[in-house]
Image (cartoon, rainbow, N blue to C red):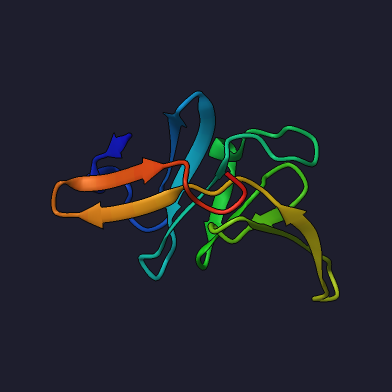
Amino acid sequence: MRVDRDALVPGAIVTVEVEGHECVMWRGRSGRLGSAPRFCPHLDSDLAEGYVTGDELVCAGHGWAFDGVGRVYKRNEYGRVDPKGTVLALTLHEDDDGIEADLTGPAA
């Protein structure tokens, strides 16, 4: 699966399907790419409706944060970070022609 680089400016989220898996990809504020399943494992909120904070994608439903390489966290109002497990993460390769995504990443 190839995505146009121009579609992923910092803070942008795009939906992709890779080998039958619905996923989202985003570009963090630093320029780093990340990916996660399209639906949050907590209550199935659509992560395409989330938002990017720093380099993480945050679920608009209940604030779970995805680091882009397969780890999921919940930050509470006191600043504590609670790990919530791992999810599928795509392997992403970027070049001048675009961004290539495949299923060889963590938890694939």
Q: Report the label total.
A: 0
Quadrant in the picture for the N terminus: top left
Up the image or down, 52 lies above or below 23; here it is below
Query: Which residue lies at the image location 57% right of the left edge and 54% below the top edge?
Result: 106
Q: Residue at x 63, y 33 (%)?
A: 46
Residue at 75 percent of width and 40 percent of height: 41
Q: Residue at x 59, y 61 (%)?
A: 67
Establish if 77 lies above or below 20. Answer: below
The extreme left residue here reads: 96
In the image, is 85 to the left or to the right of 25? right
Query: Going by the image, does 102 lie left or right of 6?
Result: right
Could you say where residue 9 lies in the image, as x and y percent from the top left? 32, 53
Q: Nearer the viewer, residue 12 or 34?
A: 34
Residue sitting farthest toward the top = 20
In this rendering, the answer to whether 15 lies above or below 76 is above
In the image, residue 61 lies at what x, y percent? 74, 42
Residue 50, position as x, y percentages in the image: 59, 44
Of 44 and 92, nearer the camera is: 92
Left or right: residue 67 compared with residue 44: left
Where is residue 87 drawn, in percent x and y?
66, 48
Q: In the rendered image, which quarter is residue 29 located in?
A: bottom left
- Quadrant of the snapshot with the C terminus: top right
Q: Nearer the viewer, residue 4 or 104?
A: 104
